[in-house]
Amino acid sequence: MTKKISYLGLGTMGSGMVTNLLKAGYELTVWNRNAEKCEPFSRKGARVAGTPAAAAVRDVDLIMYSLSNDQAVEEVVFGAKGILDGIKEGQIAMDMSTVLPETSLREEEAYAKRGVDFLDAPVFGSKNESADAKLWILAAGNKAIFEKVKPVLEHLGQTVHYFGKNGNAAAMKLVGNLIVALEMEALAEGLVLAQKAGLDLKTVMEVVKVADFRSPLLVSNGQNILKRDFSTNFALKLMLKDAGLIEKFAKNLQSPIPALRVAEKNLESAVALGFGEENASALIKALEKEAGVGVKAS
């Protein structure tokens, strides 16, 4: 039974997950590049590690981490005083980051040499889902290990989906993020077109809420766009980063992604305009500039 956990990476997603693991009664050790982010969890009883290696050295059953990109995984896992410098045989490592499948497979190989089991376990959802333990969690790796840690994941998400061999969950995350990027592009294009056509945007959103193309993503982001609320749940710059990962992944598989390239161009434009730290829905600002309109409720 998993009782002691180290969690590395206390960004938007990691902070929510650590909060819920503490609520569930697990003994937590935390680490973050910016140590100040550890302080709120230290006050709630978590121990703080000075390095990723120190977090792994602690007498824990499971080392979990959610990091910003493949480069961060490279540094935190493989770098000096990284997880691999401290982890030991019999422990379990779980990468919850959005990375290329090849990164997950490289992690699996390195951990296996140390007698450590590894799962890639990225998630769908953003700030609110992480805080409310309502994430949709993917997992891949040894089935017996997955079953062993599944109770931990159930404290973090509303569903948990097993995808078989290592790398498959990382692949599914990129498939899902492709769909998300195209939904966001479609929403932005549609709202700009509706604005240019002189339609009442509140009524437009009433249709979006009920029609056969509806989705929670379209509804929530559409409503916030009309309010000009671009507070960050999932940063625009991270969506652009993920688009780059998807492009590389698809190229390796010779799988066509023509629509993503359109969305990626608009993401790049919105980031260049200075909106990278805003929510991904700020993608619309690049189209608004091109169209010469601002989308908002009348």
Image: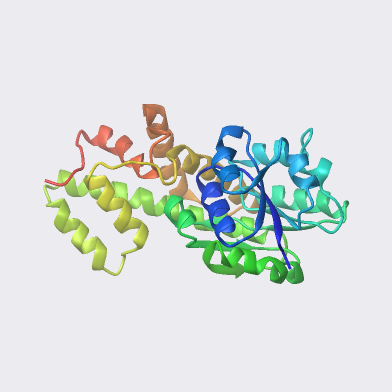
Task: Give the residue drawn at x 42%, y 38%.
Answer: 267
Identify the colour scheme used. Answer: rainbow
Task: Give the residue drawn at x 63%, y 69%.
Answer: 151
Q: Which of the 4 image quadrants contains residue 245?
A: top right
Residue 125 showing in the rendered view: no
- Residue 144 percent coordinates (x, y): 76, 71
Q: Quadrant of the N terminus?
A: bottom right
Left of 108 or right of it: where is 282?
Answer: left
Quick one: which residue is furthest to the top in this view?
A: 273
Left of 30 or right of it: where is 59?
Answer: right
- Residue 130 percent coordinates (x, y): 49, 55
Q: Which of the 4 image quadrants contains residue 230?
A: top left
Task: Give the residue drawn at x 47%, y 54%.
Answer: 131
- Residue 165 percent coordinates (x, y): 72, 64
Task: Give the residue drawn at x 82%, y 48%.
Answer: 87
Q: Nearer the viewer, residue 239 or 89?
A: 89
Residue 131 showing in the rendered view: yes
Q: Nearer the viewer, residue 256 or 33?
A: 33
